[in-house]
Amino acid sequence: MERQFLSEVPAESVGIGSRDIVRFVRALEESGTEMHGFVILRHGYIAAKGWWQPFAQNIPHSAQSLTKTVTGTAYGIAEKEGLLSLEDRLVDLFPEFADRDGAYWSRLKMRHILTMSSGMESMPSVKDREWIRQFFKTPIVHEPGTAFFYNSIACSMVGACITRKTGLGLKEFLTPRLFRKLGISEDRVGWLNHPDGSQNGSGGIITTTLDNAKLIQLYLQKGCWQGEQILSPEWVEFATNLQNPTDREAGRGYGGMMWIRENSFYADGAMGQLAVGFPKNDMVVSLHQTVSTPEANRKMTELLFEFGQKDYPDSLPADEEAAREQKGFCRKLALPAPPCSGPSPWQEKIQGRRCEIWEGVAAFFPEDVGTVFNEEYHDYAHAFTFRFPKEGMLLLEMESASGRHVVRAGMEGRGYTNEVKGRIPMTEAVLSACWTGENRLTLSVRWLENCRTRELEFCFGDEEVVIRSVQQKVGGFDVEPIEAKAMWKA
């Protein structure tokens, strides 16, 4: 049978040993990272893929700064359409800010904001409603193009330039030009906004593991997809080669809205959202995960690049037994089951009762989305009602500014997936609960389109409930625990 582009094939048929893939994935699990999903492409075919339940192939996942490469791709399309060029000056694109102080402002070009070489040493907050105006107020202290500074707002400015030229937001611009052509579901793509309503071009996209692999495959194919030149070839050459070194001797640094390392190029988002192109091997490795410590990140990164930079033949002899083992291994990937605790006498006492917060706030939705990206995403809870309709289940009604949300939480080692529509573009949450003390119930909320879990700890009293909200810390974009007090209501 003739193989179709991006179809799943035996790994040996594209030169990778099935058992080598199993060893690689096991090593990732042992590195200290919490794996969520992986895809390996070679020669345009899927050699292996897997997701750790409850994550799944069609559930998108926050990409963090991997978004920058998506935004850079939007620039590559705009360049091909003649809308923008590397030599365009920012003050020409935004003439209302042409009178900026400082000699360097007149020299700031698209090429500089695409390569982390704006010459700035600070940037405005992504939460500022006037972030574009604040960008043009930021001092440029180095000649543009001569220094490296990781500048997220400068990357969002790339999207702002496209909007200025076309009147379209990033997602609206990319949907017919990129997403539909690559088979990326536009309905599934989520995107966090700046407070002014524009899509955050530096860290806001929510996509699947395979979506990200397709993006990097497009660059491996020099911007051509199914016979159509989607990206400017000049942009692909520029983006995938070192433009702004951080370690010239090691061949590391920044290209055009992506990172360069040892003859590879990659999109990199916080907490381990990675999609890497290895041109020598015509290979893409895409990972979704939560990396919580620098040591885990170091180990995971070393494993990833060691795997991608090995010497692989074009094909290997078929090994049906190894291929079956690899597929079976990938089908069984799962995160550890929630803890079991046994019942508590307080379960009867709180059955059907509602508590209303009178002091502080409780965070059910991912608090970092509001704290880090946009305060308007905050959707704090103000009341809870507890019901236990059957053994092993908590039916929780949570009231917030976005309405009443009734969700199921599994108990005794179970979790339930819920669709919860609040203010954020994330809806899939897996909930589990257990008694961690006679009067203490801990609710775990894992947002599948987010990198982290959150816990709500309810300490019940006869008149008052103390609620502590804790989000898993990962060493970046962290938020501190918050506490609330609630009273029982009739």
Image (cartoon, rainbow, N blue to C red):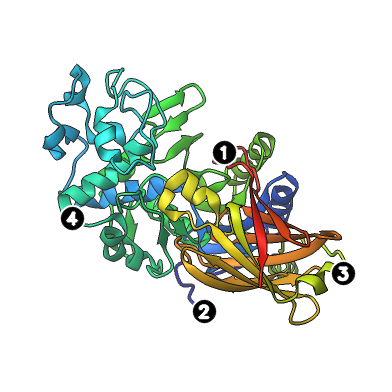
Q: Is residue 156 above or below residue 344?
A: above
Residue under circle 1?
Answer: 476
- The numbered mark at residue 184 is none
- For badge 3, the amino acid type reads Pro
Residue 254 shows in this picture: yes
What kind of element bears circle 4? loop
Q: CA distance from mark 2 to mark 4?
A: 46 Å
Q: Name the one closer to the observer, 349 or 399.
A: 349
Q: Is residue 337 visible?
A: no
Residue drawn at the location 26% of the way across and 59% of the way down: 173
Give SS at disc 1. loop
Dot 4 or dot 3, earlier in sequence: 4
Which percent across, then down, holds residue 144? 27, 23
Q: Residue at x 48, y 65 (%)?
A: 422
Q: Residue at x 32, y 41 (%)?
A: 237
Residue 61, how many percent across, how many down?
A: 52, 58
The residue labelled by disc 2 is 1
Of label 1 and label 2, which has the lower sequence position? 2
CA gap between label 4 and label 3 equals 60 Å
Q: CA distance from mark 1 to mark 4?
A: 34 Å
Residue underneath mark 3: 345
Q: Nearer the viewer, mark 4 or mark 3?
A: 3
The answer to the question of whether label 1 and label 2 lie on touching residues, with beta carbons closer than 8 A, is no
Point out the tag, 3 or 2, that comes first from the N-terminus: 2
Residue type at numbered disc 1: Gly
- Proximity of marks 3 and 2: CB atoms separated by less than 8 Å: no
